[in-house]
Image (cartoon, rainbow, N blue to C red):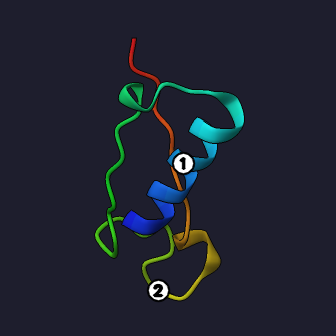
């Protein structure tokens, strides 16, 4: 999950010129699945964004 979050951050920085210091990434791994009964469910492989003002 950390690698996926880093890949999304790198994409936003390179494609949209987002300042990398404005992005914080956290890999949650298996700690916050959407589908707890099926760890392999694709919905568990996601990146979430939160806006901080």
On the question of residue 1 being in view, the answer is: no
Q: Give the x, y percent position of residue 10.
A: 54, 48
Q: Give the x, y percent position of residue 13.
A: 57, 37
Quick one: SS at disc 2? Answer: loop
Asked if the residues shown at circle 1 and circle 2 are in contact, with their CB atoms under 8 angstroms apart, the answer is no
Locate the C terminus and report the quarter of the image it occupies. top left
Quick one: SS at disc 1? Answer: helix
Locate the N terminus and report the quarter of the image it occupies. bottom left
Image point (52%, 72%), residue name: 44
Q: Label 1: few (<14), some or many (≥20) within 10 Å? A: some
Q: Is residue 38 left or right of residue 43?
A: left
Residue that label 2 marks = 39
Q: Give the x, y percent position of residue 11.
A: 62, 47
Image point (32%, 52%), residue name: 26
- Image disc number at residue 31: none
- Image disc number at residue 10: 1
Q: Quadrant of residue 17?
A: top right
Image point (41%, 33%), residue name: 23
Between 52 and 34, the one nearer to me in the picture? 52
What is the spatial separation of the Cα atoms under label 1 and label 2, in whole angstroms? 26 Å
Q: Is label 1 or label 2 in front?
A: 1
């Amino acid at each position: 999950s950390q690698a996926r979050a880093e890949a999304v951050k790198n994409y936003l920085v390179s494609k949209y010129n987002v300042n990398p210091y404005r992005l914080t990434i956290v890999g949650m791994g298996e700690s916050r699945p959407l589908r707890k009964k099926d760890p392999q469910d694709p919905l568990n492989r996601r990146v979430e964004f939160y806006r901080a003002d």
